[in-house]
Amino acid sequence: MTYDTTGSIIRYNPALDTIIDSSARAEIIAEGFEWSEGPLWVESERMLLFSDVPANTIYKWTAENGSEVYLKPSGDTGDNPNRRKEPGSNGLLLDDFGNLVLCQHGNRQLARMNAPLRQPQVAFQTLADTYNGKRLSSPNDAVYNKEGVLFFTDPPYGLPTQRDDDPEKEIAFNGVYKVKQGGEIILLTDKISKPNGIAFFPGEQKLLIGNSDPSAADWYILDLADTVVTPKLFYSATNERDGLPGLPDGLKIASNGIVYASGPGGVWIFDSTSNVLGKIALDEAASNVALSSDEKTLYITNTGKVLRVRLK
């Protein structure tokens, strides 16, 4: 199938040539959504799952059938999800057993779908929903390490006003947490204003966090080997926004340490030492990205669209 294309490749460093061809274009493989998010490539099913957060729906895309509803409701199973601007699921991931795990805005929790991937059902088991007896705000994105420990971010975007002063917000800060296998929730840091995307660098000692704050449009590293986990600046795009659409949001890190991060103007491509190698420039805000299992394809949720870019 032939798809329309969008965007362009901006090259800042010759090292980009080993990652993506300068003539590459992003294919528009699906469109017509409100705010696409949380892409997840599922190799066993050869499908891409992604959230439409305002629509409270997860879609699946396959090369054979295009996009179709996979699960609805996905993030708010209450009686009045429409009181929230973004009630649905956001980040999606698989646990060690191949179960779908969802960051649920409306239900304000991390949850596991209690159904096989091929037979999705609105049936969820809570993995994390409180910290020190207070409800989480709206888990946004998450990642597992190889030991099965779950790490996640918790900004306020699923609350009715999406603000830090929302009357339903119970925790004063926006945290980055980990969930031990026994269920204990541990705060890693409360020093990032709007923690969003999250991914491990190879070796799993360092986490990269995107901060979707217009006044601090930055990426931070959390070194888990430190006695006290303190955010360290990886890169700041605060002074590079220039009216460009989007903020540091979702991100993924390849096995070679290359970072693909949604940010102002599209998807930023960094090496592991924070050098900007280039960008996939887009006209609308990019919210998140996913890599195929062979890391030869990058999927991008791009406002109302889903894109595919071929990598080398």
Image (cartoon, rainbow, N blue to C red):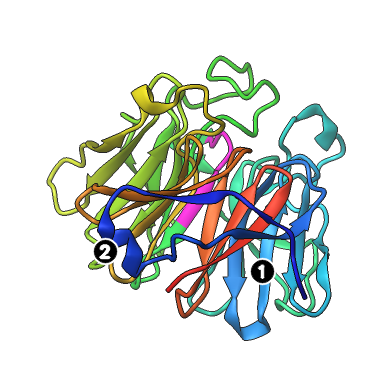
What whole-number distance in Å separates the C-alpha atoms at marks 1 and 2? 25 Å
Mark 1 or mark 2: name the one nearer the start of the chain: 1
Question: Pointer 2: what residue?
Answer: 204
Q: Residue at x 67, y 82 (%)?
A: 45
Q: Choose between 98 and 286: the one closer to the eye.
A: 286
Q: Choose between 173 and 127: the one closer to the eye.
A: 173
Q: Position of residue 108 (x, y in %)?
A: 62, 41
The reply to whether dot 1 and dot 2 touch (C-beta < 8 Å) is: no
Q: Is residue 185 visible?
A: no
Q: Residues within 10 Å of mark 1 (few under 14, many from 20)?
A: many
Q: Residue at x 42, y 25 (%)?
A: 173
Residue 166, placed above or below residue 6: above
Question: Pointer 1: what residue?
Answer: 48
Q: Position of residue 79 (x, y in %)?
A: 87, 39
Q: What's under tag 1, amino acid-wise?
A: Leu
Secondary structure of the residue carrying numbered label 1: strand
Q: Choose between 53 and 290: the one closer to the eye.
A: 290
89 inside magenta stretch:
no
